[in-house]
Image: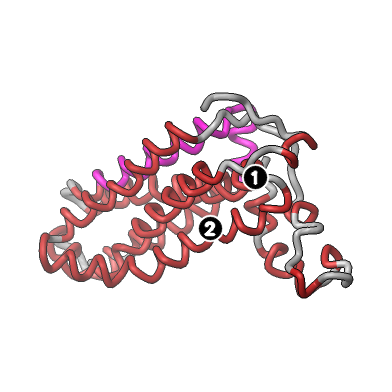
Amino acid sequence: MSSCIAADASLSSAKPAWRAVYALALGVFGLIVAEFLPASLLTPMASSLGVSEGMAGQAVTATALVALVTGLLIATATRNIDRRWVLMFFSILQIVSSLMVAFADSLAFLLLGRLLLGIAIGGFWAMSTATAMRLVPAAHVPKALAIIFSAVSVATVVAAPLGSYLGELIGWRNVFILCAIPSLLALLWQLWVLPSIAPGERRDLLHAVQGAAPPRYAGRHAGDDPDFQRPFRLLYLPAAVP
């Protein structure tokens, strides 16, 4: 469980660590759900805190801005730290954030909790895609990334309606307490299956998918095909984090 994965050519022949990839996907799911929950709970949140819905809505804006900045800086800030511990730290941060929001008695305290969530989202998102690329051989990188992004899609779709439904049943504070559960499960799963991952050199996502094109690209130099490269270019920034 704790064997170190080196960022070298030998990784391409390693056995895919699919359980670790799914653990990362669960972590991403929990973070994205937490990010979008306030969108469906603004009215009760604002009423409980004694502020306008517009002010309560800053909980979403603040999270997104901090996530953006964190995603850009995380590689430099954690350049010498085992990626396993970095990822688990962000999972812990999401749990703390959800509990802070659940027990917030003021808008300022709620925003502080949401700022912590922004750090967790920006850091975990950047690290999860890069780490997934190092957990599987190059030929399986597209599948690993598809698993991660599927978690994002599912979380984005279910977060708002689920939050609205549960908010009516148990109240918005209890919804945020429940929101910590996926990240707690992800944290325990990561502790169990995620190997130690030493910081390594940047791995270009476009190079990682060379030769991994679907059959319809056979004979077309898929690695140089712009249609095949386009989605991976969009992912380049987070996936390039060492």
Name the kind of residue labelled 2 in the image: Ile
Within 10 Å of disc 1 (Cα), the crowding (few <14, some 14-19, many 20+) is many
Question: Circle 1 is placed at which residue position?
Answer: 136
Work out whether 82 lies above or below 45: above
Q: Nearer the viewer, residue 52 or 193?
A: 193
Q: In the orientation shown, which residue stands out farthest toward the top?
A: 3
Left or right placement of residue 113 versus residue 127 in this view? left
Would residue 119 be seen by someone viewing this image from the given angle? no
Residue at image position (73%, 49%) is 138
Work out whether 208 lies above or below 57: above
Q: Which residues are magenta?
A: 73-100
Separation (CA) of disc 1 from disc 2 = 12 Å
Disc on res. 147: 2
Name the kind of residue labelled 1 in the image: Val
- Color theme of the render: secondary structure
Q: Is residue 10 magenta-colored?
A: no
Which quadrant holds residue 91?
Answer: top left
Left or right placement of residue 155 versus residue 79 in this view? left
Q: Nearer the viewer, residue 155 or 195?
A: 195
Q: Is residue 83 magenta-colored?
A: yes
x, y percent for residue 188: 37, 36
The local secondary structure at tag 1 comes to loop
